[in-house]
Amino acid sequence: MSAKRPRDTGSLFAAAGLEQDAPRPLPDRMRPHKLSDVVGQDHILGPDGALTRMLETRTLGSLIFWGPPGTGKTTVARLLADATELHFEQISAVFSGVADLKKAFDAARGRRETGKGTLLFVDEVHRFNRAQQDSFLPVMEDGTVVLVGATTENPSFELNAALLSRARVLVFRSLDAAAIEKLFARAEEVEGRKLPLDAEARATLVRMADGDGRAALTLVEEVWRAARKDEIFNAEQLQAILQRRAPIYDKSAEGHYNLISALHKSVRGSDPDAAVYYLARMLDAGEDPLVLARRIVRMAVEDIGLADPQALVIANAAKDAYDFLGSPEGELAIAQAVIYLATAPKSNAAYKAYGAAMQTAKRAGSLLPPKHVLNAPTGLMKSEGYGAGYEYDHDAPDAFSGQDYFPEALGRQTFYDPPERGFEREIRKRLEYWAKLRKERGGG
C-alpha cells in the first residue's frame, strides 16, 4: 500500500495566482526605511549628530558601532549604505573565516572597478582574532571597502589598535523609556490595534524590554498572541504570561564591570539606595554573591578605612554569613553590609598612605633602619651599635618616647593624614598630640 502524498499547498497557491509568504516577525516588519525613523540614537542621528554631519558631506569613513543588542546597529549600517549609494555587504564574525573575508574583499574590488563602492558590515567584529582583524587594514586604507563593524564589547579591549586607529567609534545607547514607548506606538499603528495592557502593565513592558528595541517588539508580539478578545492585562498577569525576560548581563564582560563600578561608586558616594539597587541587579542577573562580597571587603578598606574600623569587620562578617547561609538568605547579609558601608563615614587616608609609602619604599631601596631600632642578638652586633639608645616606649611618660624610626638618610616622612571624620577624628587628635611630644622630646 503506497503512502499518501501530502498536498503541495504551495503549488495550489501558485496555480491560483497567489503568493504565499511566511509571516514576518514584527521587528522585521518595523525595520526603519530611513535614518530619521531610528529611535533612541539622537546623539548620532539628530540634527547635530556625528553621522548626520558625515552624511551632509556625502562621504563616509570606516566606523565601529559599539552598543548593546537591539539598539539599531545593523539597521543604521544598512541605511548608511543607501544614503551614500554604496553596495551593502554583510558578514558575521561568528560564521565567517578567512575564505569568506577574501571572497568579500575580491567582490568589493570588482565593484570598485565599475565605480561602485562597498560598505562592508561586520557583525560581532570583536569575535575575529587579531590576524583576521589585521586583514581589514589594506582594504580600508586603499578604499576598497568602507568598514562598519558592530560590537557589543568594549572596542578598547577587543579590537586591534591598528584597526581602531583607522575607524571612528560611535556609541549606541540602550533605548530609554521614551524610545521604547515610541516603538510601542508605531507597532500599534502598524497593527491597527492597541496593546491590551493597563497603564501599569505597559510601564512594566517597557522595563522588560531592558533598552533593547528588538526585544521590545518581540514582547509586543507575544502580548498580542496571548490576549483573548477584549482582555486587558494588568502588570501581574503580564509577568505571568511573558515569564519575564532575563536581564542582559554577561558576568565575564563589560556588563559586569559597569554594574560593579556603579555599586562601588554608590557606596563611596554614600548613597545606600543606589548601592543596594545595583547589588540587587547583579544578584538578580546571576552574579556570584562571593564575588560581590570580596568587592565589599575592598570597599571597606579603600573607601572607609579607619574612619569606621567596624566597616571591615562588617564586610568580612557578611562574607562569612553568606558562606554559612547560602542563597537567598545569605544575600541579605551582603545587602546589610552594603548599606552599612554606604552610610559609614568615608576616608581613603589609609589607602593613600599605603600607596605613598610604597612609592617611597621603592625609591629608598635598601636603606637600613636606624641602629637603635635594630635588635642585637650577638655581641658583635651590640659592639656595632645595634640597639644602642633605644628607649622602651612603655617606660616613657605617656608610653611615648618620641624617637624617630625612619632611616637617617631618608628623614621623617608623613604618609597618613586622617581627615576629621568618623573615628579618624580621634586618631588625628592622637597624632597631633604625639607630634607635639615628639617635638618637645627632640625626636623630630
Image (cartoon, helix red, strand yellow):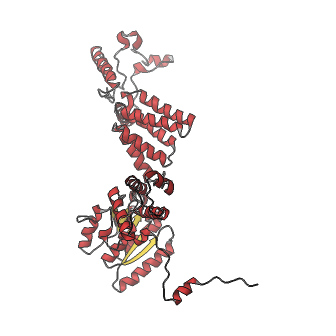
Judge left or right: residue 399 versus residue 251.
left
- The C terminus: image quadrant: top left
Q: Position of residue 207 (x, y in %)?
A: 40, 54
Judge left or right: residue 427 versus residue 95.
left
- On the question of residue 159 being in view, the answer is no
Residue depicted at 46% across the width and 29% down the height = 313
Residue depicted at 39% across the width and 45% down the height = 261
Q: Where 380 sits versus 245, above or below?
A: above
Q: Where 438 sits versus 236, above or below?
A: above
**Quadrant housing residue 186:** bottom left
Residue depicted at 38% across the width and 12% down the height = 399
Judge left or right: residue 170 versus residue 123.
left
- The N terminus: image quadrant: bottom right
The residue closer to the viewer here, 179 or 12, is 12
Q: Position of residue 297 (x, y in %)?
A: 45, 35
The residue closer to the viewer here, 331 or 58, is 331
The residue closer to the viewer here, 37 or 120, is 37
Please tell me how many numbered marks the rendered image carries: 0
Q: Position of residue 258 (x, y in %)?
A: 40, 49
Residue farthest to the front, as pictured: 230
